[in-house]
Structure formats: structure tokens, C-alpha cells
Amino acid sequence: MAYSRPTYKPRYENFIGGEWVPPLSGEYFDNLSPVDGELLTKIPRSSTADVDAAVAAGVKAFETYRHTSVIERSTLLNKIADKIEANLEALAIAETLDNGKAVRETLNADVPLVIDHFRYFASVIRAEAGTVADLDENTISQEIHEPLGVVAQIIPWNFPLLMAAWKIAPAIAAGNCVVLKPASATPMSILLLMETIQDVLPKGVVNIINGAGGKIGKHLATHPDIKKVGFTGETTTGQLIMQYATENIIPSTLELGGKSPNVFFESIMAKDDEFFDKAIEGLVLFAFNSGEVCTCPSRALIQESIYEPFMKRVLERVKAITQENPLDPTTKMGAQASVNQKEKILEYIRIGKEEGAECLIGGAEYKNKTFPKGNYIQPTIFKGHNKMRIFQEEIFGPVLCVTTFKDEAEALAIANDTIYGLGSGVWSRDAHQLHSMSRGIEAGRVWVNCYHLYPSHASFGGYKKSGIGRETHMMMLNAYRHTKNILTSYNKNKLGFF
Amino acid sequence: MTIHRLSATSEALKVIEMLKKEYGELVFNQSGGCCDGTAPMCYEKKDFHVPSHNIKMGEVGGCEFFIDKDQFEYFRYSQIVLDVKEEKAAFGNSFSLEIDEGYQFITRSRIFSDEENRLLKEQEK
């Protein structure tokens, strides 16, 4: 049974200082659902003055919040998690309507991971400590952590709620206040999330400001009261953010995408067992989240000795991907996030065909009879070689590029022949091969005999042009903190210099 | 016959003119990566430090258009047409200037023929 489309408020406001505040311009954007192309709600088109108000609310809240105890912050994060858990289904439906992804994903992945992320950071801050060193018998060095202040977070549209959680949870766990700008394509679910947690959240600790990056992003990233910028998105805006960060000499963390290799060695077919079945799914995970994942396993490298029989099984599995209604929990793949995204994917499908890649399945729009105005693409597999543009550029859609290799050395060379280094996968029954490949691949995450798992406490981030910094691990806390060294001498005698 | 790596549609040129009136001189840089990646970013010229090793692909509407040198290795065999899509609903999370006006620049590509690649090689000697 498909969920029906709930009615949302005709418009939402910015969330500033714990209040719902209309934009000073009085202007709003239409927020369309990629599921059916219909209007979901309207969202504020903010100006720089709205940004100033949000930052000021953060600065005011920080005066108090910086002094909260670890116990208070941990309790806050747990309460946020509980509130979200109590509204899991409503948030999952909103996320599907806002982003387009299938509801079975939002119910079972996105929102549960959001909940767990808050609980994870609630836990780890209780169990960590600074360090103390006995430098000599009279000198003690203490390393103490202190929050940065108000931090800006600019997040993408592919996992609106989860990316908000990845950014907000460590920042507020570490004692910072946040001004977050959702992607202007997918602001609604985050605003619903704020409605869900506003009763437990101290005013001004998290502020949400909506609008296009070109209008307010620079003002936010260069604001003198902003002490750090976190950004997930494309490379050029990432460079711009780093450049802006130089103005106030503040840190930035960037997660900028990838073109992740997923490598399948011949031993996977040594038996036709549950592990081989898992490996087939591991390849077909390119269609997870309609392919709109920074770590989408969008390049499959298959050992040539098993290419034919493996692909035969893979194509059967791809054929079984159902589309049509993303709100139906049995639907396997949802919509693309916007009309433009759909167009961009179709453009790459065209480029792939023009480059001479062989289209094995899909290769066109999916004509959705239920939602003819939605944005749907058929899961698509191309066979080609790694120098083709479709193998090198992030398509951000359900488009897989497959190539073959002879041996481990060639597999590693192809895997690393990319400007990115975010995700990767290695599939084999040979333990030595798994080890040498996972050490050889230049990427921040190597999934070994699995893919697309995002548990808290496993760090996530990029090598090469995929960005700087790590998320989803307690090490992220230090990206949101200063380290203060308190150096104490218990020696009553002077140095003797003067 | 000169082969051009880059051109722009009349719609794209119109949006460039509109943005120039509001922001002054502009610069384009082809992006890559997550979300709005693989779309061209349009920024104020004074605002974006073009990375030193980026390659200039040409000019559109009097604005220079750059691309990362490694990305260029894959774009060098394509002719790029800068186009624009109207998208009145909010879109994206990049800082490209046209988004707020309800547009998004896109790059359309055509793979050069062998003959065109040969001519380009001579042209760029």
C-alpha cells in the first residue's frame, strides 16, 4: 500500500532564534516535489539581512550554550533522537516527497541513520576526555577542548535529513551553535525536522536559513562571526568556500563527491552461494538513492574471466528494479531530485552513447504513468573504458559504467585513475587480495565485501578532490573545537633568565 | 576552419547579460563532483580566484570559461555548448549566481570527430 501525500503548510519560514521568521524581503521560492512535479510548499528566499539575524541568534545562544555541561548536551542530543524516532514515518514520507527517493529507503536508511547519529554523538561525548601530560615532575600540560562558536553548514539535496544530522550532531555535541543552509531544492524535510525538535532545542542553538547559495552563501561563509564552514557539494563551490575561509582565517570541511570504483574479483563466482548473491546486490547498489550519492559505486570493475556470467546475473537483478510510485514501500527506486538533474543524467547518457559505450540496459527516461510530471530515469548500465567521460565525471544518477580488468595490478590502476577518492568497494574471497586492494585504493572509504553502509563510528571523507575532513566519527568533534593547552608549573623557582 | 571548444546558446547569453547588470564582470568555472557538479559555476570575476593550473576553454558573452586541468583531459575531446535551463522552483546548493534568478547553466557536449581532433591538435600547437 502506497502512502498518500500529506498536506503540508502552504509556506514555511526560516528558523531563527527558536522562532519561525519570515524573510525580510517577503519573497518565497516554490518547492516542487520531484515525485509528481507538483508544488509541495513555498520556502523563504532569504537576503543577507536574514543571514545576519540567524548568525546573531547563534552568537547570542552561544553565550549560554558554550557553558552547558557534557551531560546537558548529551541529554539534548538523546532527546532530539527520541523526538525524531517518534516521528520517523512522517519525516520519511516528507523526505521522499522533497527529494524523490523511494520511501523504503527513507524509512529504513535515512531517518534511522539520522536518529542513530544523534545518539552516537550523545554517547561519545560522555566517554571522551582531554589529555594530561606530566612533562616533568613540576610541569603539567593539559589539552582541553573548547567549542569554536557559531558555525555555518551548507548541505546538499541528496540526503537532506541525513546530511543535516551529520553536520548538526557533532557541532552541537561539541558545544557550538549552528546556522545551516539546506539545499534550496530540498528544504522542507529539514524544516519539518526543526518543527519536530524545537521544543527540546534551546533557542538559537540551531538556526535554519533558506535560499540560493549565490545570494546568501558568500555572506554566510564570510561573516566575521562565523568560526567554521562545513560544506557538501561540488568542487568549484568547495574551492570558493576555502577561499572565503581565508578571509577570516577559519577552518572549512568539504565533502565534494566521487566516482567510486567497485571491484569484483573472479573468486566471487567460485560458489553460487549467499555471498555471490550479496556481490550481485553490491553491484546493483549503484541504483540506491536513484544513484544520487557521492559514493555511488558508479564504476564497476569486473575481472574479465567472470564478466559474461556475472553480468548475466546482474542484469536480471537490474531488470527487477521497480519504479513508478516512490511512496509505495515495495518500489525499489524513486525519482531524481529535480528536472535539471534528470536532464543532466540524460545528457550523460547521450554522451556515453556518443563516446561509443555499449548500453546494456536502460539508457532512457522512465515514463511514469502514475506521475507523468515526476523526474524518472531507468537504471542504466554502460560498458566502456575508463578514459571515457562517463567513467570520469560524477553523473549523480542511476548510471553505472562497467569495464573489465585482467589482474589485480590492472584493477588497482583503473580504480585509482580518477580525480576523486571518496568511496570504493572490493569483492573477493581471497583475504590477501582484499587487504592489498583496500590498502592500494586511494579513497577515504573502502567497503570490503559490502557497500553503502554508513554506520556511525566509521569515518567518512575523501582523498584527492573529494574533499577535506572526516564525518560520522567522534574525530569530527575536533573539527568543531579548539584545543587549549593549559601549561602549569608547580615549581616555585624562577627560570633564571632575568 | 577554426574549431571552437566552447560556445553558448542565445538563451545562455541573455542570462549572462542579465547577471552582468547585477553583478558586473563574471567568470565561469566548470565544476565536478557531488550534486550540482558537472555543471558550470558562474561567479563574480572579482570573487573567484581561478586556480593557477586551470585551463581556459574559451569565452562566452565576454566571460572567461575555465576548467580544472585534470578534468580537461576528459573534456578535451568534447565541444561544449553553454546552455541554460529555466527552473523557477528553487534548485541546487551551489553558489552559482543564476540559481537565485530561477535559472541553471548547463554544459551540453558533443564528442569531436577524428578529423576535428586532428584539426584541434594543429590549431593548438
Image (cartoon, coloured by chain):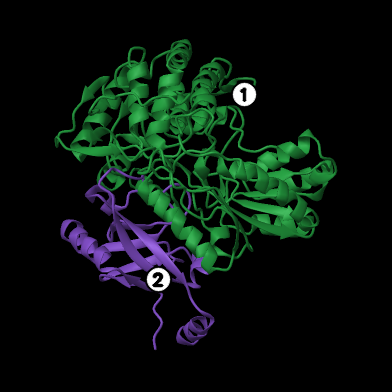
Q: Is residue A292 above or below residue A159?
A: below
> Viewed as shown, does residue A108 lie left or right of A303?
left
Chain A: its colour in the image is green
Q: Which mark is residue A245?
A: none
**Dots 1 and 2 on the same chain:** no
Q: Residue at x 45, y 70 (%)?
A: B110
Query: As shown in the figure, which amino acid type bears the numbered disc 1?
Result: Ala
Question: In the displayed image of the protein, which residue is found farthest to the front?
Answer: A369
The residue depicted at 52 percent of the width and 21 percent of the height is A121
Marks 1,2: beta carbons within 8 A: no
Chain B drawn colour: purple
Q: CA distance from mark 1 to mark 2?
A: 53 Å
Q: In this view of the protein, can residue A462 be seen by the observer? A: yes
Residue A486 placement (x, y as % from top left) = 50, 24
- On residue B56, which mark appears? 2
Left or right: residue B65 versus residue A173 is left
Q: Which mark is residue A133?
A: 1
